[in-house]
Image: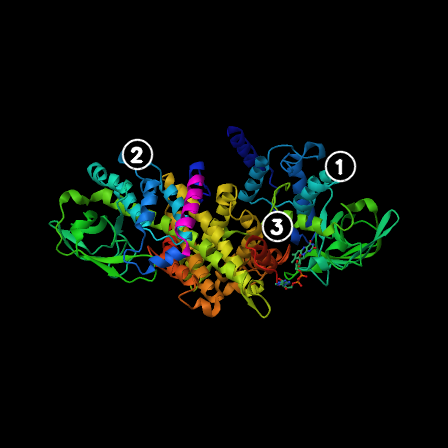
């Protein structure tokens, strides 16, 4: 079996980013703010987004010549982890995944789009279709003579996105179309998803004419799809790792407060040992996350590390969310209890870009032959 | 950097050239399972050879027999021993618990007297903490040490004493003040085992082999200078010992303490073992399990890497070290249990059977894996420690 690397690099710059982002998310996304946005149409707070843009976060991974800071996906993951922890409602992750795809676009396309994103335009990627296949190259939507036919679903933040990167099939080969919000008027149909802190929509694309200049094709398209998968796996791992820490705090607080049979429920081992297991899972998840981030930043092959990170973090998060509900008793069954917010986030992340069983099957082929 | 690379090459070559020949008997898998004189002699000679080559206690002070070099050199040696799957060194309790303890809080005389013998395996050490009536609840220890002039008189019994038959010294937790039923009444001793009135009796393990003893104290007189620290400080010193034992603090002399199979060995096993008429590695359910173990193992290795980056551990600095024993011992336990199942109906064979897979080593490894989920504080106690000390949950 191939020897796996065990390297984790974490720069002083990342350490500062992590500190800043942790403080930012704690301040801007108290659970009250999260709840206020649940029923809102856009699902996010534009003022908070503007603050993030002002901090330079939307341009972290955009080259300096296009108005960004020219850093890597590792720095993006670093600020994403605390966002996950505080359930910060934001189109940040969608936008960053699109950025990773656009780094494979032509020079002219990059010049036209990346500066807009660095200045705060929101972007997203439209990959999945009705049958819910996670394989990003299994694309049914086509463009024939540059006329689209098909639909995309589970397009996160489509309702607020300015720029859409859409996977299609052109002459049988995978390609990407870069569309503007104006191209999609009235074709963005909101979906109802399990995580109410997020927004998703279906895109009805049939009949839209696209200019050839908006396409990414050939090798560049395949690389862009790979970049989308890598970015999605890494940032889902970051959100999930943050989420585990967040829901563990909620659970531990309650276990230290609530009493039953005359003692704190946290003194019962069936509860406290589950928390110890969750902590162990949190530690492993964060280790996987920052290792995968290290490989991504160095442009090394990261597929094994990313699939491991996603599997571990999402599975532990799903368990932690599940136990959080159970350990709150009757209160856990209510809308009021914050445990459900994390559990529903965990379920969203688990089934977004491949669940644990899916990635383990891929890993088995990669690792065991 | 290149000095370290040179050193890596040097020790890789040394261990290749100096590895002892395979013995014609089964080696134990850890220091807790050394059950025959042949096993003991083989491992002790191996430790001596490594020490004499300068590859053990490399970071300990020169004045006491150590190498006085930066820890990284010893880390490289340890990693190479793991990589080459060399036999382990048997004086684990001396090298990794008693030794660091003596260096940390011992007197100059104690350092002079004990450290060198720990390194060269002249003096084997054992640990007298558990008793027949208590183990997890260490503070309830009953073995008595009664002051009588220049001596303490020991009475009582310790049990599950690993290396008890071979040890020259014991780190011993005994009650000097019977009026104090728990923590305050305990004291810590560096006790000579070859003392009139101290006897060991081997106990047979679940594998049928030997490895630990019950140790009896019947009016055994040990000199007062065997007391470490002051009377009543036993609990504090014992807790410090346990942080060395559970890997939660550095300072150990190094070497490896076990040669148990790991996850990559299980992957290899899955290629050769057969289940349902085909190689186990072709079974989708087995593949899924294997990947779970690979992810878990990789997670623990990466925790070791992340633990060295303070900015990634700032919120709970104790989380990685205090969960280490729980994580790794439970992993190995479930892994070896799984490995048996890869063998189909042959899984039920045992050591000694002509058709047992690899001589029954997996079955033996599974039963022996309890040594780490029970010894050194059970997994349930470790989970309590993690929940209480890392997460701040209330005591039972
Ligand atoms: C191979 C091996 C080598 C050993 N070597 C040594 C040695 O060299 N020196 C030495 O001193 N000791 C040694 N031990 C002893 C070991 O430290 C004890 O066995 C261990 O601490 C458990 O104590 P016990 O056996 O008394 O079990 P008990 O404490 O009686 O525990 C029995 C069961 O109850 C559980 N339990 C107990 N208290 C709690 C609690 N508060 N919450 C939840 N569950 C609980 C335990 O987890 C266990 O499952 C060795 C043990 C083994 C297996």
Q: Residue at x 46, y 70 (%)?
A: A330
Q: Which residue occupies the foreground of this view, B80 or B342?
A: B80
Find disc 2 in the rendering and name its residue.
A64
Q: Could you tell whether B328 is left or right of B277 in the image?
A: right
Q: Is mark 3 within 8 Å of ligand 1?
A: no
Residue A134 lies in quadrant: bottom left
Residue B96 sits inside the magenta stretch? no
Most distant residue in the right direction: B149
Tell me the colour scheme of the image: rainbow
Quarter of the rendering occupied by the C terminus of chain B:
bottom right
Instruction: Pinpoint the chain carrying mark 3.
Output: B
Q: Give the range drawn in magenta.
A: A15-31
Q: Could you tell whether B336 is left or right of B197 in the image?
A: left
Q: Nearer the viewer, mark 2 or mark 3?
A: 2
What separation in Å lies between label 2 and label 1 (alpha carbons)? 61 Å
**Element at label 3:** loop
Q: x, y (%) of residue B390?
A: 56, 53
Find disc 1 in the rendering and name its residue.
B108
Instruction: Pinpoint the chain carrying mark 1.
Output: B
- Label placed on residue B246: 3
Q: x, y (%) of residue A138?
A: 25, 55
Q: Could you tell whether A201 is left or right of A143 in the image?
A: right
Discs 2 and 1 carry the same chain letter: no
Residue B84 lies in quadrant: top right
Residue A16 sits inside the magenta stretch? yes
Q: Residue at x 76, y 45 (%)?
A: B229
> Where ligand 1 lies, by quadrant?
bottom right
- On screen, residue A325 above or below B111: below
Most distant residue in the left direction: A145
């Amino acid at each position: 079996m191939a020897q796996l690397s065990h390297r984790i690099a974490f720069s002083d710059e990342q350490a500062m980013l992590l500190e800043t982002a942790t403080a930012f998310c704690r301040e801007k996304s108290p659970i009250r703010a999260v709840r206020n946005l649940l029923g809102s149409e856009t699902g996010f707070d534009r003022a908070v987004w503007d603050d993030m843009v002002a901090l330079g976060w939307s341009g972290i991974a955009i080259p300096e010549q296009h108005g960004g800071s020219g850093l890597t996906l590792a720095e993006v993951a670093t600020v994403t982890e605390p966002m996950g922890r505080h359930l910060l409602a934001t189109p940040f992750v969608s936008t960053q995944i699109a950025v990773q795809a656009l780094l494979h676009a032509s020079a002219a396309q990059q010049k036209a789009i990346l500066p807009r994103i660095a200045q705060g335009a929101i972007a997203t990627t439209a990959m999945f279709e009705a049958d819910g296949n996670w394989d990003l190259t299994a694309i049914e939507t086509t463009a024939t003579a540059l006329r689209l036919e098909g639909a995309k679903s589970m397009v996160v933040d489509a309702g607020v996105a300015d720029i859409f990167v859409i996977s299609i099939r052109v002459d049988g080969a995978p390609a990407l179309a870069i569309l503007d919000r104006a191209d999609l008027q009235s074709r963005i149909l909101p979906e109802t998803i399990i995580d109410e802190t997020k927004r998703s929509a279906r895109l009805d694309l049939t009949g839209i004419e696209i200019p050839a200049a908006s396409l990414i094709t050939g090798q560049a398209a395949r690389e862009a799809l790979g970049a989308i998968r890598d970015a999605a796996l890494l940032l889902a791992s970051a959100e999930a790792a943050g989420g585990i820490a967040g829901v563990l705090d909620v659970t531990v607080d309650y276990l230290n407060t609530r009493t039953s049979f005359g003692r704190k429920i946290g003194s019962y081992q069936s509860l406290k040992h589950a928390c110890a297991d969750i902590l162990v899972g949190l530690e492993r998840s964060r280790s996987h996350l920052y290792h995968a981030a290290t490989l991504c930043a160095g442009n090394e092959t990261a597929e094994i590390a990313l699939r491991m990170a996603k599997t571990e973090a999402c599975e532990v998060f799903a368990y932690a969310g599940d136990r959080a509900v159970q350990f709150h008793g009757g209160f856990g069954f209510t809308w009021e209890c914050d445990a459900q917010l994390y559990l529903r986030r965990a379920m969203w992340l688990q089934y977004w870009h491949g669940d644990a069983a899916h990635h383990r099957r891929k890993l088995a082929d990669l690792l065991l032959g | 950097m290149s000095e370290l690379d040179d050193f890596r090459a040097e020790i890789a070559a040394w261990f290749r050239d100096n590895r002892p020949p395979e013995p014609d008997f089964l080696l134990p898998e850890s220091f807790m399972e050394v059950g025959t004189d042949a096993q003991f002699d083989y491992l002790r000679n191996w430790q001596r050879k490594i020490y004499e080559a300068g590859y053990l206690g490399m970071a300990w002070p020169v004045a006491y027999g150590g190498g006085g070099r930066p820890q990284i050199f010893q880390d490289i040696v340890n990693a190479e021993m793991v990589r080459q799957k060399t036999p382990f060194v048997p004086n684990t309790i001396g090298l990794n618990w008693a030794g660091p303890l003596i260096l940390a809080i011992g007197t100059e005389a104690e350092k002079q007297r004990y450290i060198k013998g720990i390194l060269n395996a002249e003096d084997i050490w054992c640990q007298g903490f558990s008793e027949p009536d208590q183990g997890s609840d260490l503070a309830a220890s009953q073995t008595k040490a009664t002051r009588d002039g220049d001596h303490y008189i020991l009475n009582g019994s310790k049990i599950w004493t690993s290396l008890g038959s071979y040890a020259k010294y014991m780190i011993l937790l005994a009650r000097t003040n019977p009026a104090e039923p728990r923590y305050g009444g305990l004291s810590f001793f560096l006790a000579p085992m070859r003392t009139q009135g101290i006897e060991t009796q081997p106990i047979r393990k679940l594998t049928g082999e030997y490895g630990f003893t019950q140790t009896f104290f019947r009016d055994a007189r040990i000199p007062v200078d065997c007391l470490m620290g002051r009377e009543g400080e036993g609990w504090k010193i014992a807790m410090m010992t346990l942080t060395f034992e559970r890997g939660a603090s550095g300072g150990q002399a190094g070497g490896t303490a076990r040669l148990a199979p790991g996850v990559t060995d299980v992957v290899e096993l899955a290629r050769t073992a057969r289940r349902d008429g085909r190689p186990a590695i072709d079974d989708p359910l087995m593949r899924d399990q294997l990947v779970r173990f690979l992810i878990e193992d990789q997670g623990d290795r990466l925790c070791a890497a992340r633990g060295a980056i303070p900015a990634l551990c700032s919120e709970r600095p104790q989380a990685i070290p205090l969960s280490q024993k729980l994580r790794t011992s439970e992993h190995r336990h479930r892994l070896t249990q799984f490995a048996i199942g890869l063998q189909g109906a042959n899984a039920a064979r045992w050591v000694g059977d002509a058709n047992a897979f690899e001589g029954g080593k997996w079955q033996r490894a599974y039963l022996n894996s309890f040594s780490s989920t029970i010894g050194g504080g059970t997994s349930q106690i470790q989970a309590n420690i993690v929940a209480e000390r890392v997460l701040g949950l209330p005591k039972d």
